Amino acid sequence: MSTSTTKRSGPLAPGVAFVTGGARGLGNAIAVSFAREGARGVVIVDINPETLSEGKKTVEAYGTPCLAVQADVTKEEDVERAIAEAVKEFGRIDYAANFAGILGPLTATYETTLESFQKGMAVNSTGVFLCTKHEIIQMMKQDSIEVEEGRVPQRGAIVNCASLNSQMSIAGSVAYTTSKHAVMGITKTAALEVREHHIRVNAISPGFLLTNLLTPIVGTEGGVPIEAWNALEARQGRSAKFEEVGDVAVLITSPRMSLVNGANLFVDGGFSISEA
């Protein structure tokens, strides 16, 4: 138990953050949250070179150095390279947020092609596996970030992007739902394996936000009717803001959450506990 009576001060996240899918949408919101909470460096990783420049600017607007790396998280050599570039630039990775993802096919199980199913799995689960694996390898090489007196060391913390579909499902989402269940398998297993090394692995499950994945299909012909979307938001209680998810990612990777490991934190306004 800490004997200090000093009030907390200074940045919540003074270390180095590594965010996949970090050029736009939820991933960029997470990168910005780390910048706002005092990260000394942020690395954003994305497959799309066109969005990397703009994503980098949003982070740098807070006076935070930002390294933008183009990489495909489904390719192990790309993941290894991205982490190596991050370490070359900033010396270490203290917080990792794995948020690269795709929606995948919106077809019934019996209508889904093997190719489209495997593509969804490759990005959403294999990508999370590869990133988690190599982030852990790097974190195990590091000393602990500075922690409060009396707290256990933290050599690194990882947060993976799960989903409401990691616990629930909806017809026509076989690839997405399967991949998000797999994310929790990766998260829980890794959490148990690396806790002795003072590394934590958790997941967060965002509620309904109009992300880049959903914007093309909500309120469009053949997509999700706007009335259906409004009903989902109503069950959630209100519309959500990207930064609300970003701030949770920062908090759950902070050493202040030192006993939280292998958890799936639902960030959904109570959607997952509501019957209506």
Image (tube, rainbow, N blue to C red):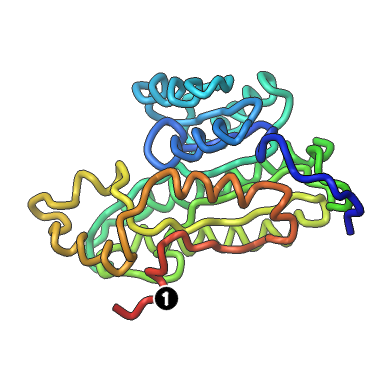
| Left or right placement of residue 106 versus residue 253 in this view | left
Is 84 above or below relative to 129? above
Which residue is drawn at the image coordinates 91% and 53% (left, top)? 3
Is residue 221 toward the left or the right of residue 250 in the image?
A: left
Q: Is residue 223 left or right of residue 38?
A: left
Extreme residue toward the right, this view: 3
Please provide percent x and percent y for residue 191. Answer: 69, 58
**Quarter of the image where one finds residue 156:** top right
The relative height of residue 36 versus residue 26 in the rendered view (above or below) is: above
The N terminus: image quadrant:
bottom right
Q: Which residue is mark 1?
A: 273
Which residue is depicted at the point 68% across and 60% down? 261
Q: Residue at x 55, y 63 (%)?
A: 264
Query: Residue 136: image x %, image y %?
Result: 70, 44
Residue at 65% across, 45% down = 133
Looking at the picture, does residue 173 appear above or below residue 40? below
**Residue 39 in picture, x, y percent from top left:** 63, 31
Vertical placement of 51 versus 93: above or below?
above
Where is the C terminus found, in terms of image quarters?
bottom left
